[in-house]
């Protein structure tokens, strides 16, 4: 039986104000079950969304997400509050996903990007054919994007998801995955470049035939 | 972006100030990229209630027992002691009442003492026609009298105290 809820939330990005979060954390440190329940309510969808980027199997993703909150509940006394509760939860999720990947040794190999960028051709992110205000992402393009994300290394995907999906800042990401800020920026650039390479390949091969009547994708 | 910088990024090598600037500009441009827009618009799927219920069960298993439980244990002990003390106090009160009731039986049996102190009066000679006789018979038929001879429990003896014997009119 699937444990997924049929409806997708329009906006699960409900977060606590700083004062409320601090009060909740204080209660959670005292093993307050109800307070921790509010934390779970607020972040369960986001943590699950993050975990699903690294764990393909849905049931396994749900299990890992449960494990994230269980570990958080156990370690709440050691949460110093320097990072936000959200990034702390992502850090736990990140470590659990890495552990799983190491155990099963099925981490995807990072694709070489040299053919796409070697040369004097300038590398521009802003694709002139993409205007989000005028175009919709088709289902086919979604598949291309998802495929591109799945084919990149976990290091790049982690930074890309945390920055572009979870809207974490560079420094917050650096603390979450324990790398320098410069490394975060480098990885973010490489991750986006990898996706753009895949999208370009799609557009150049057979995507042109599916371009909408306005000639823009 | 030139190849040299790209390779530096790929190898995670330190960048010069100019390269940093170039990277920052590339990242700013990338914020408007297709993948950034796609990920920013991602919806989130809420786990089911069954999943949440399962998580709650696991959390309860690992949650430490509330301190209040130990306190409640002591509270129950205190409550039990209070009940026991109350029972002892009640028993003591009952015992005191019982002892007082026993003394009144002695007082209530004064009719017999009166009869014994006056040799002219024989209990066998009493008749119900005289006031004293009637009172004495009534007294003997009362609960106190029955209690004094062991027929009835002496707890009812206080009623006997209301019986007045008129010694001047017999």
Image (cartoon, grey):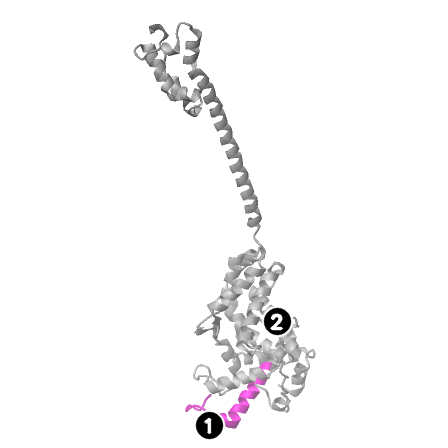
Vertical relation: B149 (above or below) A123: above
Instruction: Find the distance from the CA under tag 2 to the CA under tag 1.
Output: 42 Å
Q: Identify which residue, A117 or A1, lies in the foreground.
A: A1
Dot label at residue A96: 2
Query: Which residue does the image show at 49% across and 23% down from the upper left?
Result: B99
The answer to whether residue A167 shows anywhere in this view is: no
Vertical relation: A150 (above or below) B105: below
Q: Identify which residue, B55 or B98, lies in the foreground.
A: B98
In this view, the residue farthest toward the left is B129
Vertical relation: A214 (above or below) B121: below
Let me know if residue B79 is in the magenta part. no
Pointer 2 or 1: first along the chain: 2
Query: Which residue does the image show at 52% across and 86% down from the upper left?
Result: A144
Q: Position of residue B42 (x, y in %)?
A: 49, 76
Q: Which span is picked out in magenta?
A: A191-217
Q: Residue under circle 1? A: A209
Q: Position of residue B25 (x, y in %)?
A: 58, 79
Camera-near label (2 vs 1) is 2
């Amino acid at each position: 039986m699937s444990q997924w809820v049929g409806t997708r939330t329009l906006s699960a990005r409900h977060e606590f104000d700083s004062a409320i979060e601090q009060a909740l954390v204080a209660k959670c440190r005292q093993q307050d079950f109800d307070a921790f329940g509010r934390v779970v309510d607020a972040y369960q969808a986001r943590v699950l969304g993050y975990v699903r980027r690294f764990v393909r199997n849905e049931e396994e993703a749900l299990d890992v997400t449960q494990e994230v909150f269980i570990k958080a509940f156990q370690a709440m006394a050691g949460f110093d509050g320097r990072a936000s509760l959200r990034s702390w939860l992502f850090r736990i999720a990140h470590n659990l996903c890495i552990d799983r990947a190491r155990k099963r040794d099925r981490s995807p190999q990072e694709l070489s990007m040299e053919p796409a960028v070697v040369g004097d051709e300038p590398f521009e992110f802003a694709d002139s054919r993409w205007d989000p205000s005028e175009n919709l992402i088709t289902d086919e393009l979604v598949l291309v994007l998802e495929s591109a994300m799945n084919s990149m290394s976990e290091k790049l995907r982690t930074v890309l998801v945390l920055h572009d999906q979870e809207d974490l800042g560079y420094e917050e990401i650096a603390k979450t995955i324990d790398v320098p800020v410069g490394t975060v920026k480098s990885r973010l650039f490489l991750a986006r470049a990898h996706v753009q390479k895949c999208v370009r390949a799609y557009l150049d091969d057979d995507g042109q035939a599916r371009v909408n009547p306005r000639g823009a994708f | 972006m030139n190849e040299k910088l790209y390779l530096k990024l790929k190898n995670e090598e330190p960048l010069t100030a100019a390269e940093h600037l170039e990277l920052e500009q590339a990242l700013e441009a990338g914020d408007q990229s297709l993948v950034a827009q796609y990920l920013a618009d991602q919806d989130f799927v809420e786990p089911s209630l069954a999943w949440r219920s399962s998580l709650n069960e696991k959390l309860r298993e690992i949650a430490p027992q509330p301190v209040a439980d130990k306190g409640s244990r002591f509270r129950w002990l205190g409550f039990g002691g209070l009940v026991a003390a109350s029972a002892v106090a009640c028993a003591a009160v009952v015992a005191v009442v019982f002892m007082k009731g026993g003394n009144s039986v002695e007082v209530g049996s004064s009719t017999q003492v009166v009869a014994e102190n006056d040799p002219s009066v024989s209990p066998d000679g009493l008749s119900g026609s005289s006031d004293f006789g009637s009172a004495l018979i009534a007294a003997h038929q009362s609960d106190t009298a029955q209690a004094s001879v062991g027929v009835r429990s002496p707890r009812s003896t206080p009623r006997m105290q209301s019986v007045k014997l008129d010694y001047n009119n017999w």
